[in-house]
Image: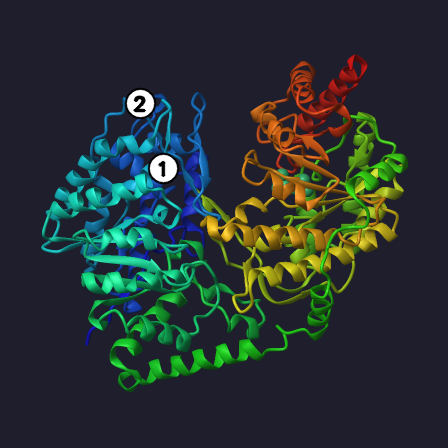
Amino acid sequence: MSVNSYVVGFPRIGEQRELKKVLESFWAKDCSFDDVKKVASDLKKRHWKYQKDAGIEFISSNDFSLYDNVLDTCILLNAIPKRFKNLKNEELYFSMARGNDSTVAMEMTKWFNTNYHYIVPELSLEDEYKLNATKIVEEYKEAKELGIKTKINIIGPITFLALSKRVDRGDTFELLNKILPIYEELLKELEKLDDEIFVQFDEPTFVKDNDSKILSLIKPAYDRLCEVSKNIKVVVTTYFEHSIEATKVLVNTPVWGIGLDFLYGEENIQALEDISKSNKKLIAGIVDGRNIWKNDIQTSLEKLSNISKTIDKDNLIVSSSCSLLHTPFTLKYEEKLQDEIKDWLSYSCEKLEEINLISKIFFNGVDNLKEKELLDLEKNIKSNFERKHSNLIHDENVQKRINVINSFENFSRDGSFQERIKLQKEILKYKDLATTTIGSFPQTPEVRKSRRDFKNATISKEQYLKDMKNYIDECIAFQEDCDLEVLVHGEPERNDMVEYFGEQLKGFAFSQNGWVQSYGSRCVKPPFIFGDISRPKAMTVDWITYAQSKTKKIMKGMLTGPVTILNWSFVRDDIPRSEISKQIAIAISDEIDDLQKAGIKIIQVDEAAFKEGYPLRNEKIKDYENWAVRDFKIAVSSAKKETQIHTHMCYSEFNDIIKTIEDMDADVISIETARSGNELLKIFKKVGYKQEVGPGVYDIHSPRVPSVEEMKTQIKLLLKVLPKEQLWINPDCGLKTRKWKETKQSLLNMVEAVKQIRAEY
Ligand code: GLN
Ligand code: ZN
């Protein structure tokens, strides 16, 4: 009986973050590269075995990486920037990723709309590409020794170019004819490995709105690649969205199979007809590779049966929607999660079982299930039923609030911006070019320890409060000495800007071991939103009022916005994201109301992740913008005219979203501009942006202390674009990753620069 089950890729950091640990120890020179290789090899073996034991038929090799797969592809093609040319092996590899004493690292950016970051290839017409197939070949052999014939994962040539940048200016796609021969050569090498080889080319760039020029590259490229060997079966895989346009081209090439995401790209069903005519294999992604919920097997079977109305069953393969890289490893180590919630979850290892089970039922029928499998199916149906009906999830009071909000037509605050700002300036009396910071101050080892000890109950609440208050006192004393104008409390009580709020809101849960790779050795452990969200009690008021009581200057309240809380969590999949975000917005608006009642006059609502929630397809952008702006507005709708609302967004790309940002109608927005001079601000000017802006005058990502002169130059540049009445002066982002020493000097210099400028202007 055939079971066609497929996994796009498996996570690699290790279920106990073994890879992270050994890499960091190697970088700290505490172990050798052989130690790294040993851990890597153990992990690969373990991961292959998990998949094999779970009955997965198509298991990948080359999905492993010591840092990043795009970086691996650079090595594969010898696409190595000149500045690294004298380095070799692991020194070369890690220098490209992380830089070294004399060379800056390559850039890193987000992998589509995920929180995974890849290394951006730097290409130039001068590059001499040549094949280095060692990693791919070795990994294939490693798996084969264990008796597993893997499919080989490779980043497709078009996606590779789409993700690259040209250092010599010009179009990266111009280089396609230079890299294709290397891909062909690679396939010739792979052909030697076995009688039949499966190669999966990942081409996620096909899910974007590609112009006809890019689409026209697909057929010639894949015609060529498929021609290399009859023994190589080529799969082209896309994920995170639909890729209808590309599918329509691929069906006319000799590829063996097409992998599509039917969860985040439901529209892919529109391409079924074409696939069916072409008689190609369809690898149907129906088990969510990006979220942590148990699959609803009955629904998945319905989906598959729908698909099989068009696609011959023999041509269907059941798969994860994307690589499982974006979900944690295994539920095995989750000991503290509430049983009821844990029963709703499925991490990578559990997803393997789901894929296997779905595929068995779909291809062989329920009647042919073994007893254990039948039990698993029953359990799955039961868990899904219970989750749907659990009163942990459904909260009538939240529903009531939502209904009230839904009856409003307009979520705007009282008063126009002009009215508000006039009142605010009268009350707050801040000067032009008012100085402030973004919220956090350096997180010292002592602060971290106190938070940790309190969490583990090894110190008393009194002691913890004392530690935090001490920090706040010192933080305020410094800001006063430094003569900053609008102060912050420094956020010592927060481990993370989302976790802090998640821990206090109902509807959130936290895992012990739900780590996912963010980049290189870095992992994040996002909170889960499992149910309706509400705020049992005030979350920040005590801290902020304490801080305000310690100074005559204005203390700025500090909150995280709804869209950012949403985008940095794993979210429930039973209601739309926009509904969840609305629930968070209501909770935040209550907090603002409480802060205001407690006498806080300026409140900042951070939306650091506003931009990363943007959909991959243009046709979906308007909808996202509509509800994201709506929910920011709901969150701040409780602010009175005289309460000044700030927001903060740390990116340097506003071109496409500036009008949307203006619609959010925050009185003041602080942004990251230090590295781009006044270019970014010009966009604000161009659209006639009305509200006030705090462009970052220094980069907080580096310990370097900018001089007074430097910051004066920066401020003068800013003043060429916007009038001083509209500008605030602040660093690019929060200071929590910096040390006190450099922070103090930088802020002193910043305030001094403003003073000198004020005297001149
Ligand atoms: N208020 C937060 C801080 O200062 C903002 C962090 C961020 O934008 N990422 O740390
Ligand atoms: Zn920031």
Q: For the residue labelled by badge 1, is the local secondary structure a helix, a strand or a loop?
A: loop
Residue 40 lies left or right of residue 413; in this view the side is: left
Q: For the residue labelled by badge 2, is the local secondary structure a helix, a strand or a loop?
A: loop
Disc 2: CA contacts within 10 A as few (<14), some (14-19) or many (>=20): few
Task: Give above or below for 49 relative to 221.
Answer: below
Residue at mark 2 to residue at mark 1: CA–CA distance: 23 Å
Circles 2, 1 touching at the beta carbon (< 8 Å): no
Which mark is first along the chain, 1 or 2?
A: 1
Q: Can residue 34 be seen in this view?
A: no
Q: Residue 85 carries which label?
A: 2
Q: Point out residue 77 in the picture as x, y percentages from the top left corner.
A: 25, 34
| Residue 645 location, quadrant | top right
Quadrant of the snapshot with the C terminus: top right
- For the point 58% across and 25% down, the residue is 679
Q: Point out residue 223 in the picture as x, y percentages from the top left corner.
A: 17, 46
* Residue type, mark 1 in image: Ser
Q: Residue 214 carries which label?
A: none
According to the picture, the residue beneath numbered tag 1 turns out to be 32
Q: Point out residue 118 in the picture as x, y percentages from the top left corner.
A: 41, 41
